[in-house]
Image (cartoon, coloured by chain):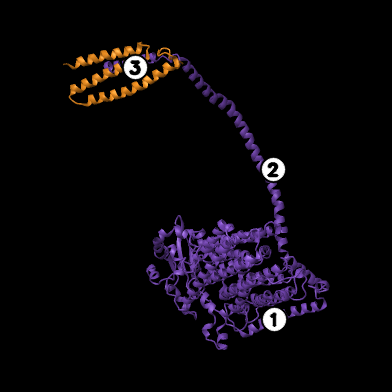
Amino acid sequence: MYLNQFLIFAAILFCIGVYGVLVRKNGVLVLMSIELILNSVNINLVAFGAFNGDIAGQVFALFVIAVAAAEVGVGLAIVLLIYRNRRSIDVAEANLLKG
Amino acid sequence: MFAAEAAETAVPWLYENVWLIPALPATSFLLILFFGKRLPFKGAEIGITSVVAAFVLAVLTTFTWVGDVEGGNTAYGTVKVADEKHSDEEHGDDHSHSEDEDHGSSEEEHDDEEHDDEGALLVDGDGGDAQPIAFTAGSLAAVEEGDYEPRGAAVVTEVNWFESGLNVFRIGTLVDGQSVMMLFVVTFISMLVHIYSTDYVNGDRRYTHYFAFLSLFTASMLFMVLSSNTLQLIVGWELVGVCSFGLIGHWWEEKPNSDAALKAFLTNRVGDIGLLVGMSILFFGAGQTFDIVEINTKALNGEISGTVTTWAAVCLMAAVMSKSGQFILHTWLPDAMAGPTPVSALIHAATMVVAGVYMIGRLYGVFWEGFSIFGGTLNLMAFIGGLTTVGGGLLAFVQRDIKKVLAYSTVSQLGYMVLALGVGAYTAAMFHLFTHAFFKACLFLGAGSVSHACHHSFDMKADMGGLRKHMPITFWTFIIGSAALAGVPPLAGFWSKDEILIGAGVWPGTGGNGTYLIPFIFGMLTAAMTAAYMTRTVWLTFFGEYRGHDHPHESGRRITVPLIILATMAVFVGFLNVPKSFVSTIGLPEDWGLLFEEWVEPAGQTYFPFDGFTHAKPSLSLAIVATLLATGAGFLVLRYYQALYRKDPMASEYSDGLRARNGLAAAGYRVLENKYYLDHLYTGIIAGATKGPLARAAYWFNQNVLDGIVNVAGFISVRAGRFIYYFIDQGVVDGTVNASGRTASGSGQFLRRIQTGQVRQYATLMFGAAALLAAVFIFAV
């Protein structure tokens, strides 16, 4: 097993996540894409941790998972409220902050 | 080394804690002010309790002092003791006074606050910088010259008050014969006046306020009496002035009363300038010290130059003239009778007005050197005293108001005291102060009792006469007081007046400090006049037929009991200082003579005159002559009024008397009636002549100088304003503001396009930026 394999896998996952965030209109899918990004980072952390032979990477990954859980909670609540107000979760339509 | 000595000789507890005596009424003042109105007796009970407690302490102090002097205990010399702290529980136990628990009021607060630097003070006061102070037993060298043992050394207890630069200002107490004597007098008279007042001002609209002021006055006077330094003396001096102002103007709703209060205050201010200047001169003259003992010692040692002491004494004399009602600043004293009568008794007879006399006694070393009292030539003090004693006595003849007669008599007697001090008869002056306090308080309170009966009138000619039958107690006490004042032997006034007369040293065989002919003549004249005008007063008040309306009645017990006590004192206090020769003549031990002198006079101490200070010897012939003169004058007046009574029982003056027949007498009467035109001089001529030109000058100054300055300033500011408006405000400031506004608006217009509201676009930008950053990190670094 080479480190590269994990890193490349994580990079692909990251790019899919970024693509999802930038392209999808569905708010839930945007959130899911963000999860992808975060998890790609987790993979990196764990991989580097295993590579260096210490546990710090896994600890960081755990932190990231915990924060991601909170972030998703807030995010889903926002999406839910947007849906209640607009009967839609299309993020392209939510442009009230347009200058 | 001296600290150790002071520690060995235990100074009596009372000497070190004598500050409690002023602290009690001071506390009472605050308590009455805050709680007086809610109490059952409207605050009077607090005042009376505190003053009784203070009196008990004063009596104990007096006994301690007398015991010390009698026992020859002068071991502590003139000691300086740092105030050792005694906790509160120590003093509420002995005299069953309960309200002094929080004695930390007014001036005494300092004592409590400053206890932490006592140790330093002890060292400081006795070792280091105080080395020129002759506080050691060696200072008693003068004793060998005199014929008396050193006695009555002062006990000074001080704490640091505050420090300013190198000067340490202290506050403390000075216990010696003079202050102990005054403690007794002030608390005693104040106590009786308090009791008397509960009846006299009963139902007054400011009853509580009145008692608060009485307490404050008592506290201030005691504070002044105990001062150990001149700064403290000034504070006490001004405090009694303020209290006097408040009490004279007690019924301020009536214009004359508030005018009288103002007059008293302002006249005193004139003298106070002298006091401040004099004390400042002494402060610098004595090497930057306020310490009374040190100043006196240095003045007598010649460490302060003669010119300095002379000028200081002249300035201080001005203060004495105003406070102690000496000619020509006496004019406030008779007007001060506008206050309630007990106040007149307390302040304007027994205590406050003697502050000036007291101050001379306190700084006697300075006056002794300053006026060369030992020299035997007429000096300013003796002259002013003499002038006052005669001038005041003459004025007493023409008064209709019984209180004003007494007021002028006070002026006259104060003149006597100053005269005595001026001729070097220190003890005689202090003794006269002492005896005068009792009989004059008795007379004033008697006058109050009379006016109480006569519907609050003081007019002897219109509303009195024949009161002898209606008010026997008041009558007899008044007679005793008058006789004591007139110098009828063997009442109090006789002994003290006699001592002053022999002190002038004119009469053959009396000796004294020199031959003061003019003061002696003035003194003799006054002795005769006093008897004469008191006879007139007594006759007009108590004899003849009652000229008022309704029926007069004897006053209540709270008025008569103080009168009886004071009259008793007026009879007996004179025996405290009878000549030794007299005592041995009537077969008593010689030690019973001159007790007062022994107790009060700090003879043989360095802060008291020793060089050339001699006591005059008593003279029987002088006593007989003076008594004959006084009784003769009194008798003549008595005959005069008896003749008038036979002519018309209701009359109070002859319709065809000397005044109607003789132009000169009429003119003299007019001069007296107008009080030597001094008030006209002050208000009409001096104030009038000053205020017109002063007002015109002020107007001119206002119109020309001030208005000119204002106009120029206005013109300049208008011009400057225009310049600022057009160039700075419109150009620079507005330009800047507008430019920044335009910038903000322009950039806003440009930047708002970025703000689309599309989350995904923001994300794009964010990721793009992150990618860019990553690219920079990867390729550029």
Parent chain of label 2: B
Q: Residues within 10 Å of mark 1 (few under 14, many from 20)?
A: many
Picture layout, residue B33 above or below residue B536: above
Give the residue number, with chain letter if any, for mark 2: B703
The kind of secondary structure element at disc 1 is helix
Picture layout, residue B259 above or below residue A33: below
| Letter of the chain shown orange in the rendering | A
Give the residue number, with chain letter if any, for mark 1: B631
Parent chain of label 3: A
User: What's under tag 1, amino acid-wise?
Assistant: Thr
Q: How far apart are marks 2 and 1 (CA)?
A: 66 Å
Parent chain of label 1: B
Tag count = 3
The kind of secondary structure element at disc 2 is helix
Q: Residue at left 39%, top 67%?
A: B3
Decide if residue B174 is in sight here.
Answer: yes
| Residue A18 falls left or right of residue B483 | left
Tag 1–tag 3 contact (CB < 8 Å): no
Task: Give the colour in which the image draws chain B.
Answer: purple
Give the residue number, with chain letter if any, for mark 3: A31
Q: How far apart are marks 1 and 3 (CA)?
A: 126 Å
Q: Residues within 10 Å of mark 2 (few under 14, many from 20)?
A: few
Label 2 vs label 3, nearer the camera: 3
